[in-house]
Image (cartoon, rainbow, N blue to C red):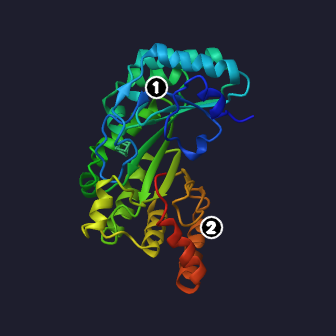
Amino acid sequence: MAIGRLRLKKHRYDFPPYRPPSEAESLLLRVTRGCNWNKCTFCSMYRDIPFERRPLAEIKRDIHYARDLYREETKTVFIADSNSLVMKADDMVAILGALYGSFPNIERITSYARAKTLLKKSFDDLKLIRDAGLTRLHVGLETGSGKLLEKIRKGITPDEFAEGCAKVKDAGFELSVYVLLGLGGEEMLEEHAIETAALLSRIDPHYIRVRTLQPQPGSEIYDDMLEGRFNKALPETILKEQKKFLENADVSSCYLSDHLTNYLPVNGVLPKDRKKMLSIISEGLTALENDPAVKESFSRKDRIKKL
Ligand code: SF4
């Protein structure tokens, strides 16, 4: 049985507004609200949510409500909101202890984390949290281009990102890194693709997850697009960028297009599936050029709002 929102909501359980698609079956546990950075120009996810750490007593109360309803069925847990590692290590250890103590069948606990926070956290604290049972971290890179990272106000350099990720891997976490296709618009395809491939080749994360930029109202990049300062990439540019990335990425990662903003289902393990993945893109480019139905289905993605 899936973890049902309605039953928990009756207890005023505090649901996070976002989770990765891979956590659709997970129990969602909110330990912070909002984003303590909240400055990335492409992101409107937490713009209206003031950042706060939830008190431990409140978090434990939610865990107890969920335990009373889903003790046996809970196998995976996702900890939210955008950067739960900003919590003190001792608090995270206490939360993880409460989760494992409440749900006997847990197989995986994951969370979003901001790379700058990982960089600042000591290795010993990361290890403590990993040993307490947080298994995987989802970290947004978006691009490996230093110029573009600065432009989108990500608040981190490529070297800092690589350093934070190396620490996470050394501490024993599974690392899932997000890349935002189209972030460089029409003009920066080459730089975005090549430098992202170069940086991820240094990091070699367990997972690379791609999303395609569909600017959302409330973000600066959306206003830039409307006012002509950002030239949104066309679907063919996005596919060429993805192709260039795959040709240049020297990684042993699982590559996933697991989001509905993406134009094509390009999924596989690198380097083993590279050829198959590249041919999906080549076929997509040909179809886009010759088949109006494909063009229309791609353009429908441009109308996706608030994911
Ligand atoms: S992309 Fe992540 S770090 Fe940047 S503002 Fe959004 S939630 Fe915060």
Which residue does the image show at 34% across and 72% down from the upper left? 186
**Residue occupying the far bottom of the picture:** 290
Q: Position of residue 256 (x, y in %)?
A: 56, 54
Numbered tag placed on residue 31 in the rendering: 1
- Under mark 1, the amino acid is Val
Q: Quadrant of residue 188?
A: bottom left
Whether disc 2's CB lies below 8 Å from ligand 1 is answered no
Q: Is residue 35 above or below residue 21?
A: above
Q: Foreground mark, 1 or 2?
A: 1
Q: Is residue 251 left or right of residue 1?
A: left
Please give the residue where the numbered disc 2 appears in the rendered image: 276
Q: Measured along the vertical axis of the image, is residue 237 above or below residue 28?
A: below
Looking at the image, which residue is at 52% across and 62% down?
262
Instruction: Pinpoint residue 254: horizontal percent, then vertical percent.
Output: 57, 51
Going from the N terminus, do you reach mark 1 or mark 2 first?
1
| Neighbour tally class for label 2: few under 14, some 14-19, many 20 plus, Cα within 10 Å | few
The residues bearing labels 1 and 2 have C-alpha atoms spaced at a distance of: 40 Å
**What is the crowding at mark 1: few (fewer than 14 residues within 10 Å), some, or many (at least 20)?**
many
Residue that appears at 24% across and 57% down: 147
Quadrant hosting ligand 1: top left
Instruction: Indicate the amino acid at tag 2.
Output: Lys
From the viewer's perspective, is residue 156 above or below residue 251? above
* 241 with respect to 1 (left or right): left
Q: Position of residue 250 (x, y in %)?
A: 47, 57
Label 1: which secondary element: loop
Q: Identify the image quadrant of the N terminus.
A: top right
